[in-house]
Amino acid sequence: NAGVTQTPKFQVLKTGQSMTLQCAQDMNHEYMSWYRQDPGMGLRLIHYSVGAGITDQGEVPNGYNVSRSTTEDFPLRLLSAAPSQTSVYFCASSYSTAHGFNSPLHFGNGTRLTVT
Amino acid sequence: AQSVSQHNHHVILSEAASLELGCNYSYGGTVNLFWYVQYPGQHLQLLLKYFSGDPLVKGIKGFEAEFIKSKFSFNLRKPSVQWSDTAEYFCAVILSGAGSYQLTFGKGTKLSVIP
């Protein structure tokens, strides 16, 4: 009963480096999303997906790419890391229907990213 | 623009005190509402949710929240807090209905309970 699994837990990058944060869920959830959490800012939506092959931008998408080739996986790519991307990143998933999103999110344990 | 406001950044209470955390939203339609809790070093967990029906919603660990549509509010309450309630609390709102997939969080309220 793994739920939402994120890897790695911690990562340090140099400015300009790229990397991929992994997220996998085993609950057959259609909806998956990435949030970043910064002190005093709450959680802000980066990208989300409502099913395989479908992605869309959230509130703060710049500097990040996503893809959804399978229902289970939703990786987040940092193309060229910047110090402003230092944050804690959470992946979350949920059921969703054609009538919208009305189920609670299940969160992963987070990835703490530092960009120097 | 849609937004969620949590009035208090940091609340400090003694054990057994009553708690009320404010949450207001600015959305122009029917909404679904959530409260999440984040214990130190952990991920967010659902406390309670409101989709429709009775506006007084009961959640886990003795928490409850009241949806007041006329005030665009969804305040979280607990009659008697415990030290273990020390955590950060987030209100979240989403428009109800087809095509609505962006859940918006407030900035959070940190609760410290003193034994």
Image (cartoon, coloured by chain):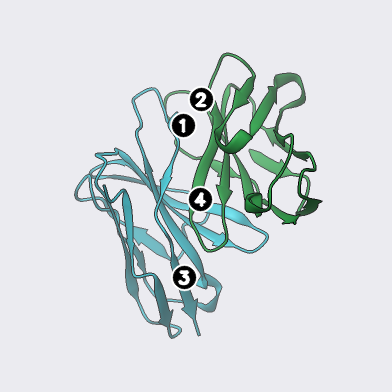
Contact? badges 2 and 1 (CB < 8 Å): yes
Tell me: residue A65, above or below residue B20. Answer: below
Instruction: Look at the image and give the colour of chain B.
Output: green
Q: Amino acid at mark 2?
A: Ser
Q: Residue at x 25, y 53 (%)?
A: A73
Q: Residue at x 51, y 50 (%)?
A: B44
- Numbered disc in front, either 2 or 3: 3
Direction from residue A44 to residue A46 in the image, left or right: left
Q: Which label was assigned to residue B100? A: 1
Compare marks 2 and 4 and give the one earlier in the sequence.
Answer: 4
- Numbered disc in front, either 2 or 4: 4
Q: Which residue was labeled with disc 3?
A: A112
Instruction: Look at the image and give the colour of chain A.
Output: cyan
Residue B107 shows in the view: no
Contact? badges 2 and 4 (CB < 8 Å): no
Mark 3 vs mark 1, CA separation in Å: 29 Å
Q: Residues within 10 Å of mark 2 (few under 14, many from 20)?
A: some
Q: Which residue was labeled with disc 4?
A: B44
Q: Residues within 10 Å of mark 3 (few under 14, many from 20)?
A: some
Q: Check if mark 3 and mark 4 are on a common chain.
A: no
Mark 3 vs mark 4, CA separation in Å: 15 Å
Query: Which chain is disc 3 placed on?
Result: A
Contact? badges 3 and 1 (CB < 8 Å): no
Q: Which residue was labeled with disc 2?
A: B96
Direction from residue B9 to residue A114 in the image, left or right: left
In front: B27, or B1?
Answer: B27
- Position in image of residue B37 (x %, y %): 57, 47
Compare marks 4 and 1 and give the one earlier in the sequence.
Answer: 4
* SS of the residue under disc 4: strand
